[in-house]
Image (cartoon, coloured by chain):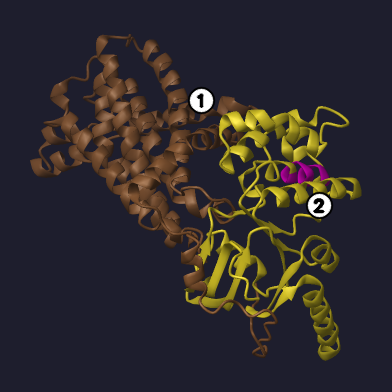
Chain colours: A yellow, B brown
Amino acid sequence: MADTERVPTVVADGVHITYTVRNGPSGTRRVHAVKGVSFAAYKGEAIGLIGSNGSGKSTLLKAVAGLQPVERGQVYTQGQPSLLGVNAALMGDLTGERNVILGGLAMGMSRAEVRERYDDIVEFSGVNEKDDAISRPMRTYSSGMGARLRFAIAAAKSHDVLLIDEALATGDARFRRRSQRRIDELRAEAGTVFLVSHSNSTITETCERALWLEAGTLRMDGPAREVVAAYEDFTGAGKTRQT
Amino acid sequence: MTTQSLAPPEALPSAAPPQDLRALALRHGLTVSGARPSLPAYARQLWSRRAFITAFASARLTAQYSQARLGQVWQLMTPLLNAAVYYAIFGVLMNAKHGVPDYVPFLITGIFVWTFTSQTLTAGTRAISGNLGLVRALHFPRASLPISLALQQLQQFLLSLAALVVILFGFGEFPAPSWLLAIPALFLQTLFNTGAALVLARLAARLPDVSQLMPFVLRTWMYASGAMWSIQNLASDGRFPAGVVLALQCNPAAVYIDLMRFALIGSYTSAQLPPHVWALAAGWALLAFGGGFIWFWKAEESYGRG
């Protein structure tokens, strides 16, 4: 690809990421999660990240978001990429209503913006369909309701570079369709979308390009269909090797 | 979690990345992700997040007792029960009230003011280490967390103050012009607490064992600061050199406790305060807040690592 006219939004230049795992007083273990990954992502692209469990996909995504320091190499970004997700900011003891406000503020929205989008968020989540659940503490929600409200809050804000980590697998079929539509909207508003998923069909449907990480290194970077096909060959081979 | 690499995979990039990625990034004006902003930029970011800081503080305050039957009543019950226990042990059993006029207001003011400092410091140690999920998921200036928790403790303390005022009425202390001095005293104490919380947040983020050590540090500090006994009486006792007594009196916790007593209790006069007490109070506050803020900022990009 000799196309230099396209505008890059995320550039990873030889990125290595290590982190320390503490186990007990004497033992700390260094985990080398990402080993020398390089790529350039351009405006308007939707890029899928695939690979086995623990291959470093989520860690790489965190580094792009600036939430995980890199050991060597550098991640350059346009603006501030954001991970889709606010779970950690929400409190189960508070009502859904207060969590919508808290989550919105945590993502960097102003009070006025939160107020403006509040009704849309509640309606999108659908938690109020049967009763006035939004005024109940979130810990009383069913797991599906909680997941829907969390997604609705997280998806309320549009971003330059959006990073989505397995967010599509929440809620029932009806909500999944709705959230798929919202992801498409976010994609249209965002410059670039990264999607981590274990569902190969989600990757090929949503993304035109895919990165395949295996054991922290970039195995393949190319059109989503080709990369997913190669990955499926590999996992099939992996199964026979294990037995 | 487990990322052991067994076989070095044969790299087969089908779309070769541009040769000089760094040059490409810089040509298009991309910036390094997660780099630490300058101190003024950091302060501006923090200010723009003030709505989140206050919302997080009051959310924590509301969530704190929401599982308890008595709910928010515990906000008042906890300091009152503490005061009752300390009165029984120090006032009655150990007779610390001997030679202290208005011992109950003296004791309860001391306990409440100390509790504000100790709770803020304890919260500070957990500000980063107890919110790693948040730090790893969302982007915001990390100082928001210790500042927000300090604010939560301030709100809690204002509620305790309401209880304190009622107790003071019960013991014949009524509002006087000197009560206004409680406002600057409280302001300076809050600054000091917040700064110390920032320091502890960074320490405990790197070294989780700090939070194990804190209860002992805090207990020692409480006993040394005259929360339930009079440092002044120690001076007249004559068993300790004047320098030791002065050092105890000038430690920040004692300064803020004594200023609040001076403001609220009629029989507690300026003779019982160390020299230059307001300068001391302001100095500790500025030192802790300024130093704490800069020191916390210096490690901004490392929080949540590992």
**Residue tagged 1:** B76
- B131 displayed left or right of B279: right
Of all residues shown, which one is farthest toward the right?
A: A173
Three-letter amino acid code of the residue under disc 2: Thr
Q: Position of residue B31 (x, y in %)?
A: 47, 60
Q: Give the class, few, some or many, for how many residues have Cα within 10 Å of label 1's Cα (few <14, many ≥20).
A: some
Q: Is residue A12 above or below residue B154?
A: below
User: Is residue A182 visible from the viewing direction of this image?
Assistant: yes
The region drawn magenta spans A144-151
Residue A49: image quadrant is bottom right
The span from disc 2 to disc 1 (Cα, nearest Å) is 41 Å
Q: Secondary structure at mark 2?
A: loop
**Residue tagged 2:** A170
Q: Main secondary structure of the magenta part?
A: helix
Looking at the picture, tell me which residue is in the foreground, B81 or A59. A59
Q: Residue at x 24, y 24 (%)?
A: B100
Q: Position of residue B293 (x, y in %)?
A: 34, 47
Residue B237: image quadrant is top left
Q: In front of the other: label 2 or label 1? A: 2
Q: Give the class, few, some or many, for how many residues have Cα within 10 Å of label 2's Cα (few <14, many ≥20).
A: some
Image quadrant containing the N terminus of chain B: bottom right
Q: Is residue B223 above or below residue B37?
A: above
Three-letter amino acid code of the residue under disc 1: Leu
- A131 displayed left or right of B73: right
Magenta span includes A150: yes
Residues beneath discs 2 and 1 located on the same chain: no
- B73 displayed left or right of A99: left
Magenta span includes B212: no
Name the mark on residue B183.
Answer: none
